[in-house]
Amino acid sequence: MRWPWGTTLSGFPPRAWLALAGLGLVSQLCGWLAINYALGHLRAAPVSVCLLAQAVVTAVVAMPVLGEFLRTNQLAGGALVLGGIYLVTAGERSLP
């Protein structure tokens, strides 16, 4: 199959396909299972808010791994997200 921009989805060695399948299973399946486990044992409100941390963690990991640089507005947004998570989880701890 040939895409309009000239790339194909064929011709890759089996090891590359296994690596892609492994990445999909680890990041998607394990993540999905962890979220469903958390929703079964914790309150939905803090779990759903904590899921917002995925973007922040991804950006922080991309700095050393991919050599990315975060701009000031991205740092401020990450701080807001983490602050919101803190407020929600701190409020949950004070509930009976």
Image (tube, grey):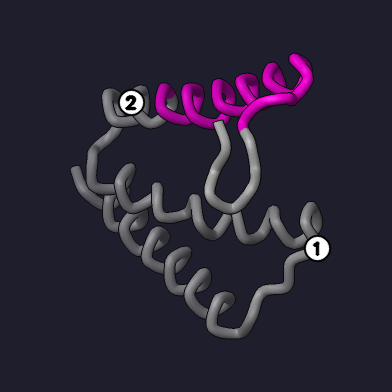
Q: Position of residue 76 (x, y in %)?
A: 52, 80
Q: Which mark is residue 36?
A: 2
Q: Does 59 appear in magenta? A: no
The earlier-in-sequence mark between 2 and 1 is: 2
Element at label 1: loop
Image side of residue 19 versus residue 79, left or right:
right
Q: Position of residue 1 (x, y in %)?
A: 55, 30
Image side of residue 78 versus residue 72, left or right:
left
* Magenta extent: 9-33
Element at label 2: helix
Image side of residue 16 versus residue 56, left or right:
right
Quarter of the rendering occupied by the C terminus = top left
Compared with 80, 52 (above or below) is above
Label 2: how many Cα within 10 Å (few below 14, some 14–19, many 20+): few
Which residue occupies the foreground of this view, 90 or 76?
A: 76
Which residue does the numbered mark 1 point to in the structure image? 67
Q: Position of residue 77 (x, y in %)?
A: 48, 75
Which residue occupies the foreground of this view, 38 or 54?
A: 54
